[in-house]
Image: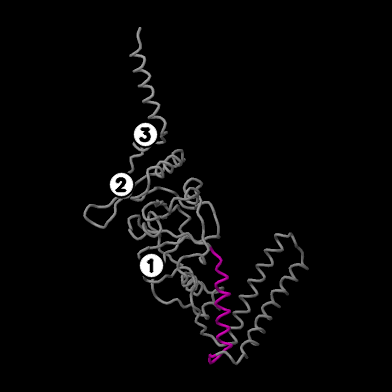
């Protein structure tokens, strides 16, 4: 994967939501399933079946057998099934499953309705591509590399109503961070898939094509990806700043500032503003003293203050 070092700060744009509070207050990150991304082509490469059918069958059989074996081992572990008989049964079942899949593919390839020159080759490519993608069950957290991108604020920062969190990368976390490449081909070579378990270069080419390539039009994101197990996990990064959008309300600012007030490692707060006469943005230090001086407020307070003045006036009017 990418050997390039990440920038000093990485930026996560979010709308205000419970998940945002989990991210900031509980210091958690949500590693998303790539299948839920807004771009259906993201993390879905096309397989170039550049091997003869016999070799494609071997590669597909191995991938299928490995996946079924891993799934059954995980199930047996959760049920606390152990012992040589269980291990042997799982191994035999995974082998039979792979053999049965190939038999089904060969049978369906004899269907005369397929309008392709080599139905077997076409089917093997389809199933091999599916198995390849099922191996990539990783979760992804996406970051930008700048806080002043208008498109990022509009698309991911709730049209400037949300926030942008800035993270530094501690030593040891770099290995799971990877830079996205834009443009180029979506193809993955079957020959690389066949070699990726024993050839680091082949594995890197497959990984890059599956996880780290997007269409050129997404280039404005300047994206870096943190890759890990899917779901919510403690953040391996260090929260450094919270930047509020131009339209972010004072109450949202107050809520987040107060929520992070007692954080062991202090966080800096900024607000985004326009640069006069341009379409550019710049962040400015947020005056948190002024913010907390006016909030929280209670609407009845003013009424009570006037009631006290009225009471004093009545006392002064009354005869001695």
* Residue position marked by numbered label 2 in the rendering: 284
Q: Indicate whether 64 appears above or below 153.
A: below
Which residues are drawn in magenta?
115-138
Q: Nearer the viewer, residue 70 or 43?
A: 43
* Residue position marked by numbered label 3 in the rendering: 293
Q: Nearer the viewer, residue 291 or 183?
A: 291
Labels 3, 2: front one:
3
Pick whichever of labels 3 and 2 is earlier in the sequence.
Answer: 2
Q: Indicate whether 241 appears above or below 316.
A: below
Dot 2 surroundings within 10 Å: few (below 14), some, or many (20 or more)? few
Q: How much space separates mark 3 and mark 2, taking CA atoms?
A: 19 Å
| Lateral position of residue 16 relative to residue 288, left or right | right
- The residue that appears at 33% across and 43% down in the rendered structure is 286
Q: Indicate whether 243 appears above or below 82.
A: above
* Residue position marked by numbered label 1 in the rendering: 218
Dot 1 surroundings within 10 Å: few (below 14), some, or many (20 or more)? some
């Amino acid at each position: 994967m990418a050997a390039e070092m990440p920038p000093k700060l990485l930026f996560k744009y979010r709308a205000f939501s419970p998940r945002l509070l989990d991210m900031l207050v509980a210091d958690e990150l949500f590693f998303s399933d790539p299948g839920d991304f807004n771009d259906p082509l993201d993390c879905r490469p096309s397989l170039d079946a550049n091997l003869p059918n016999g070799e494609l069958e071997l590669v597909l059989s191995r991938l299928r057998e490995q996946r079924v074996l891993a799934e059954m081992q995980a199930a047996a572990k959760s049920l606390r099934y152990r012992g040589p008989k269980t291990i042997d049964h799982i191994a035999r079942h995974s082998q039979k499953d792979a053999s049965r899949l190939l038999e089904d593919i060969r049978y369906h390839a004899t269907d005369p309705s397929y309008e392709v020159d080599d139905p077997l080759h076409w089917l093997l490519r389809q199933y091999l591509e599916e198995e390849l993608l099922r191996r990539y069950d990783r979760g992804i957290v996406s970051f930008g590399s700048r806080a002043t991108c208008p498109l990022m604020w509009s698309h991911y920062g709730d049209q400037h109503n949300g926030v942008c969190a800035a993270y530094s990368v501690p030593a040891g976390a770099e290995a799971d961070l990877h830079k996205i490449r834009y443009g180029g081909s979506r193809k993955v070579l079957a020959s690389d898939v066949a070699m990726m378990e024993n050839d680091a270069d082949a594995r890197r080419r497959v990984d890059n094509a599956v996880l780290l390539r997007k269409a050129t039009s997404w280039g404005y994101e300047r994206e870096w990806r943190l890759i890990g197990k899917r779901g919510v996990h403690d953040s391996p990064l260090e929260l450094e700043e919270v930047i509020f959008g131009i339209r972010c309300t004072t109450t949202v600012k107050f809520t987040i500032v107060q929520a992070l007030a007692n954080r062991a490692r202090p966080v800096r707060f900024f607000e985004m503003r326009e640069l006069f006469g341009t379409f550019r943005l710049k962040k400015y230090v947020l005056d948190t003293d002024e913010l907390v001086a006016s909030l929280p407020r209670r609407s009845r307070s003013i009424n009570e203050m006037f009631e006290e003045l009225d009471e004093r006036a009545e006392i002064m009017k009354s005869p001695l």
